Structure formats: C-alpha cells, structure tokens
C-alpha cells in the first residue's frame, strides 16, 4: 500500500505518527512502546530523528568478510588485498612481430621448428610465439622474403622493406619479465576493479581475486493495486520501483540477488521474507506495507518472525513509515513506503549507510548547500526536499509530493530542512543523489 501516516494498529510497534502528507502533525498521541524507539516521554513513544535513524543504520551492522571471486565476476568489486604476479610477465621470451626468428647473418636457411638455431638459420614465428633457443632477433615479415639458395634449399633473405641494419640483435624480442617480475605488485588493495585490472590479473596468473564483501539484497514489492506495465485503470497505480530500484541499490554498493512480489496479506508477506537457500540475502528491501492500514502487513510479519525493530519510524517528511528491522537469522529489513519519493528518501536515509557499512565503504557523505529561498517552519518532522542549484543556491523543486517523482528527476540533491525552517542563504545539510 502507499505510505500511511495513521495511528499504529494494536500489537504492532509504532510511534507517534507525524501528520499525513500536507497536514500539520499532532503534538502528541498515545502509542505502545516500540523496540528501538528513540525515546519515551510520559508514555509517548517518539520517532527517531533523521540524524538518529541514519546513525543507527550505520552502527547496527559490521562489514561483511572478504572472499574470493572468479575473474569473470570481479568487475566493479573492491580488491581486499594486494595482488602480485605469480610469475614473470611474460614468463618466456616472445616475439613482438610476425616473421622469422633468426640467428646470425642473412641469408638464413629454414630450420625445423623446435630445434636450436645455429648461426645462419631461421624459423617462422608469430606474434607472442616462443623465441627458440639460439635466436638473436626477429625479422619482420615485411622485411624478409622466402627464396632459394644456389643448392635449391629454402632460405630467408632481406626484402625491399628491410631497414638499414635490420635485424639488430634482440630486435622485436620481448624478454621474459619485461612487464613484471615474479611477485611484483600489480594491483593495490582498495582498488575498484576495472576491465584492465581483470586482464592484468589474468596475465599475472590469477584465476580468482580477493574482494571485499558486498551485501546481497532481495527486493520485495507489495501492493495489490500496482500494475507492472501499461496505463493503469483508475484505482491502480504504475509500478515505479522494479525498473529502477535494483540499479539504485547497485549504485549504493549492493548486489540484487532476487525480486519478488507480495500480495497484501500476511501469508504472502511471510513467504516473501523467507530466505532463499540458493541466493541468500543479507538485506531485504521492501516497498509499501510499512503503514498501519488493514492492507499493510510488513510490521506484523516482522513480529511473527521474532524480528527486532531498530528504527520503527522516522520523524521526517516524506518517508515517516520507513523502518529498519533485523531478523533472528541476521538479515536486515529496510521497509520503504509505497510512495516513490518517500521510498527514495527512505532508501537514502537507512539503506545507503547500511549498504555502505556492510560493503566496507565509507559512510555516505552529507554535504552542505546554501538555501536559495526562505522556508517556513513546519510543525513536527524534518523535511527532506529535492532541490536545484540556481546560481549556487539550493531552491526547492516543484512536484515533490511523496507520490511524485518529477521533482526528484530534475533535482541536484536533497536538502535536509529542520522543523523551524530556514532563512535564505542559511547552510543546510544536503544528501547527494547516487546517480549525479
């Protein structure tokens, strides 16, 4: 279901809700105590602030252990240890040109392949071919001709393309170890592996590489009203998550190992949260079902699985129902609201630091921007507002209701506006967008 800001259902962890999108938040309300709640004043459970929620997501976990992966799957991974050559590179003297390996002066009598060359002998060779014992140089194919001597034996002679003094001793021979000696450092730990690194490691004799752990993520999409393609009928909405959420998770350091849709009932949600033995996940990211309506079952499912709520709600707008929980088997659940902008704000608040910590990456930076226009006070939560930079100042985007994506699509970042608002020119925290 779409983002809900209603009073928690009985028996379900909750906090004082902020107002529904676009309305003022109540001063207080009675709510049951929630595991991991930020605080309690006279029986009133308070939601975590945006800053607290982000800090909890970073502190609640540890980096995954390093492991080895095959070269073919190492692209984009972060190297966990230095890589040295396992042998000299190249590990034998080889030809840099097509032509003939020769010994002595011309003409050269053709010798049997594999035999040691005596002075005055030659043998055909290709680029990368092993230089035979006794060879002193390689004559390029452009510089030589096949001919016969006075006795009718096949010989190689210098052709019209030969340069003066060609071939010089050692010419066009790549000596062993020219690129690297055995055990020479090739790639340093901490490097993000690109195609050239993969090729270099292969040339150095490696079949696998040690890489930092990368969190495996399962995505669970909810909402009986969601359609995957085409123009939805009234009462239905288009799926805004499956085309892009996996890519954003990848930008944040995760690897999607599965995507499943869950119907709006408890049994389907429990099935979706079950781990896959073939593709086990470290994190489950869900969309929708984080509210407290009769169609929202994520919180109930987490309780049924004996999960712990680290962040039940966040005092922010949009995205108040965003949650972070942990199951007894060690998997984390990041519950995102069903509205697209609210979900993206929730992902950058909780998902980004969680993924970074588990992947041994630095905590995502929060920068600063100068506010481009006065922003009025808002009773209750912190507001996260997509902005555009205009002459160096951050101006709030239009079309930033929690269900809209038009504003975020044109944004340079998201600024964090405190409840008391902001003055023009005031410095505000700013979340960079992972795709910018």
Image: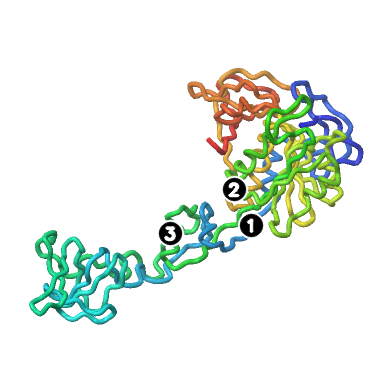
Nearer-N-terminus badge (3/2): 3
The crowding category of the residue bearing disc 3, from other C-alpha atoms within 10 Å (few below 14, some 14 to 19, many at least 20), is few
Which residue is rendered at x = 64% and y = 44% of the image?
353
Give the answer, above or below, for where 22 lies relative to 90. Answer: above
Decide if residue 199 is on the left or right side of residue 12: left
Q: Position of residue 147 (x, y in %)?
A: 14, 70
Q: Is residue 41 visible?
A: no
Percent from the top left, x then y, of residue 333? 74, 47
Mark 1 or mark 2: whose residue is earlier in sequence = 1
Res. 50 image quadrant = top right
Q: Are marks 1 and 2 in contact (CB under 8 Å)?
A: no
Residue in front for this viewpoint, 67 or 74: 74
Q: Please, what secondary structure does the residue beneath circle 1 have? A: loop
View extreme (left): residue: 150
Residue 22 lies, in percent from the top left, at: 74, 21
Q: Give how far apart the Cα atoms at labels 1 and 2 are.
A: 12 Å
| Residue where numbered disc 3 is placed | 199
Q: Is residue 67 above or below residue 116?
A: above
Q: Nearer the viewer, mark 3 or mark 1?
A: 3
What residue would you read off at disc 2? 253
CA neighbours of label 2 inside 10 A, class few (<14), some (14 to 19), many (20+)? many
With 186 as the anchor, is 15 left or right in this view? right
Q: Residue at 52% of width from left, 65% of height from top?
A: 208
Front residue of 287 and 421: 287
Mark 3 and mark 2 residues within 8 Å of each other at the beta carbon? no
- 363 horizontally vs 228: left or right: left
Tag of residue 64: 1
**Residue 319, percent from left and from top:** 72, 33
Q: Does residue 282 show up? A: yes
């Amino acid at each position: 279901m779409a983002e809900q800001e209603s009073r928690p259902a009985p028996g379900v962890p909750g906090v004082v809700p902020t107002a529904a999108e676009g309305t003022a938040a109540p001063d207080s309300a009675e709510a049951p105590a929630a595991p991991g709640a930020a605080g309690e004043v006279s029986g009133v459970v308070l939601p975590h602030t945006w800053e607290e929620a982000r800090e909890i997501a970073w502190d609640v976990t540890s980096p995954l252990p390093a492991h080895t992966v095959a070269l073919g799957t190492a692209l984009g991974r972060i190297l966990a240890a230095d890589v040295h050559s396992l042998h000299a590179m190249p590990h034998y003297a080889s030809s840099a040109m097509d032509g003939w390996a020769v010994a002595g002066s011309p003409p050269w009598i053709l010798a049997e392949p594999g035999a040691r060359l005596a002075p005055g002998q030659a043998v055909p060779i290709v680029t990368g071919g092993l230089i035979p014992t006794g060879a002193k140089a390689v004559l390029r194919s452009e510089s030589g001709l096949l001919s016969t001597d006075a006795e009718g034996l096949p010989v190689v002679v210098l052709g019209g393309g030969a340069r003066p003094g060609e071939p010089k001793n050692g010419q066009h021979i790549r000596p062993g170890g020219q690129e690297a000696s055995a055990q020479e450092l090739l790639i340093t730990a901490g490097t993000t592996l690109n195609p050239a690194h993969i090729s270099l490691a292969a040339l150095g004799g490696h079949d696998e590489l040690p890489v930092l752990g990368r969190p495996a993520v399962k995505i669970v999409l909810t909402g009986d009203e969601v359609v995957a393609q085409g123009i939805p009928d009234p009462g239905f909405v288009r799926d805004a998550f499956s085309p892009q959420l996996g890519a954003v998770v990848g930008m944040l350091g995760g690897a999607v190992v599965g995507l499943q849709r869950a119907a709006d009932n408890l049994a389907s949600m429990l099935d979706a949260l079950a781990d896959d033995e073939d593709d086990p996940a470290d994190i489950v990211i869900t969309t929708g079902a984080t509210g407290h309506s009769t169609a929202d079952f994520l919180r109930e499912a987490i309780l049924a699985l004996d999960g712990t709520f680290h962040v039940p709600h966040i005092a922010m707008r949009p995205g108040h129902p965003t949650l972070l929980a942990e199951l007894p088997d060690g998997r984390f659940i990041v519950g995102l609201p069903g509205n697209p902008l609210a979900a993206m704000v929730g992902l950058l608040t909780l998902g980004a630091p969680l993924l970074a910590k588990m992947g041994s990456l630095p905590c995502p930076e929060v920068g600063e921007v100068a506010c481009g226009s006065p922003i009025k006070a808002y009773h209750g939560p912190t507001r996260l507002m997509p902005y555009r930079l205009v002459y160096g100042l951050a101006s709030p985007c239009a079309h930033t209701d929690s269900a809209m994506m038009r504003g975020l699509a044109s944004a340079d970042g998201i600024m964090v506006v405190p409840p008391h608002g902001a003055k023009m020119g005031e410095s505000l925290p700013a979340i960079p967008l992972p795709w910018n």
